[in-house]
């Protein structure tokens, strides 16, 4: 697992695996069992300081404080959509901004998590690509997103599913992604079931194979076209990995978490929404253990791309279904707060900025009412 050291020489403890914490503590002369205690405090309790680790000896806490620190993201904005979707804008230690989106839906609460600051893939339909790649997120930054959302939610918003579909291409950051996913899956840490965790990719073929071999997680491939020429025009990665290479890799992946790959298909009017496209998509799915998720494009003023009509989307879906392809249409969520697919990184902070004074005021009020100040209800903030 990569080791991340702050300017003052302290190591980001949350970016270490349990065995690495064990090695660090035993190297400092502490008992090995202390590592699991510390690990649980970090990921199950979400403590902000070593002093809060009450079952860890004071001498061990002192040793930890001399060598490590506990990292967190700063929440600088929370936006609430008319449809109930919530978007968190976080600030990292170096001042970068990333976003997470919580999508509540009939008892299922899905958190969309970012894996990079910006993105290098430059897909024409995605606003995040306009930022370019600023840097990869550390394992701690990937894992702190669900941890910190949990700390600010009532039980009705308990996260049930996680999708790595936020800012960035997860497999471009695979060296940090895999250690982060191990923390997600670890029952001693974030404890998400493998069937509740999905990683989305534009199709980095070698990394896709590596992920499938390493961990039992769901895989979603952003397809968005039915020919190489068409896909190159909207997804530059196709110049490196052809559609044929990608589909062949998907056919042979050792799937551990699910029997099917989800193929995401963003439908853009006049680009990839014709019945000829539907026919070619059926052919592409032959031999694949797959389902198709149709995503009508989310229009925005920064793009000339248009959304297909609902009737055309239904016709497209009907053609897939009648030819034996499992196909669903994703309902657009969070569009009014730029939280929908392809919109992350374009937050309008003027709508719902949460500054330090407001958070302090909330804490003072809740303390006065004898309430837990570590957990904010959404309506307290927005």
Image (cartoon, rainbow, N blue to C red):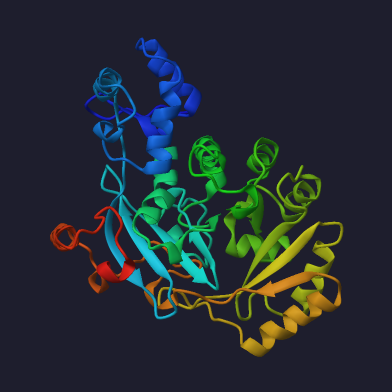
Q: Residue at x 52, y 43 (%)?
A: 184
* Above-or-below relation of 3 to 320: above
Name the residue: 15% across, 63% down.
Answer: 365
User: Considering only vertical position in the picture, is 182 above or below 28?
Assistant: below
Q: Position of residue 318 (x, y in %)?
A: 77, 81
Image vertical order of residue 321 relative to residue 344, above or below: below
Residue 87 in percent (x, y) is at 38, 65
Residue 106 is left or right of residue 28, and the answer is: right
**Image quadrant where residue 277 sits:** bottom right
* Left or right, 322 with reference to 353: right
Would residue 127 be visible to someone looking at this image? no
Quarter in which the C terminus is drawn: bottom left
The residue closer to the viewer here, 378 or 267, is 378
Q: Is residue 291 visible?
A: yes
In the rendered image, the residue lying farthest to the bottom is 311
Relative vertical location of residue 141 with respect to residue 315 in this rendering, above or below? above
State the image coordinates of residue 335 (x, y, percent, origin top left). Answer: 44, 76
């Amino acid at each position: 697992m990569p080791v991340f050291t702050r300017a003052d020489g302290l190591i980001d403890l949350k970016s270490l695996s349990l065995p690495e914490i064990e090695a660090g503590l035993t190297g400092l002369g502490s008992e090995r069992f202390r590592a699991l205690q510390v690990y649980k405090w970090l990921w199950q309790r979400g403590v902000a300081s070593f002093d809060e680790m009450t079952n860890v000896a004071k001498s061990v806490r002192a040793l930890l404080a001399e060598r490590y620190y506990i990292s967190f993201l700063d929440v600088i904005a929370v936006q609430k959509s008319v449809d109930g979707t919530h978007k968190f804008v976080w600030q990292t230690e170096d001042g970068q901004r990333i976003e997470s989106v919580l999508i509540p839906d009939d008892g299922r609460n899905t958190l969309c998590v970012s894996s990079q600051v910006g993105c290098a893939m430059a897909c024409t339909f995605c606003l995040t690509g306009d930022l370019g790649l600023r840097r990869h997120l550390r394992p701690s930054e990937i894992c702190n997103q669900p941890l910190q959302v949990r700390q600010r939610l009532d039980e009705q918003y308990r996260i049930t599913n996680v999708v790595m579909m936020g800012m960035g291409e997860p497999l471009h950051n695979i060296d940090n992604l895999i250690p982060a996913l191990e923390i997600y899956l670890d029952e001693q840490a974030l404890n998400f079931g493998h069937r509740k965790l999905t990683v989305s990719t534009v199709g980095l073929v070698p990394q896709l194979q590596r992920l499938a071999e390493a961990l039992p997680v769901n895989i979603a491939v952003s397809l968005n076209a039915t020919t190489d020429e068409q896909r190159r025009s909207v997804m530059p990665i196709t110049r490196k990995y052809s559609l044929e290479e990608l589909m062949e890799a998907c056919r042979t992946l050792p799937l551990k978490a699910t029997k099917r790959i989800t193929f995401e298909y963003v439908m853009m009017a006049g680009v990839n929404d014709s019945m000829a496209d539907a026919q070619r998509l059926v052919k592409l799915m032959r031999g694949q253990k797959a389902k198709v998720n149709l995503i009508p494009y989310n229009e925005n003023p920064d793009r000339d791309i248009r959304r297909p009509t609902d009737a055309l989307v239904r016709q497209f879906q009907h053609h897939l279904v009648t030819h034996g392809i499992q196909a669903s249409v994703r309902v657009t969520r969070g569009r009014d707060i730029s939280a929908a697919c392809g919109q992350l990184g374009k937050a309008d902070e003027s709508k719902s900025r949460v500054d330090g004074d407001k958070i302090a005021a909330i804490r003072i009020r809740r303390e006065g009412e004898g309430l837990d100040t570590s957990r904010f209800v959404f309506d307290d903030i927005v």
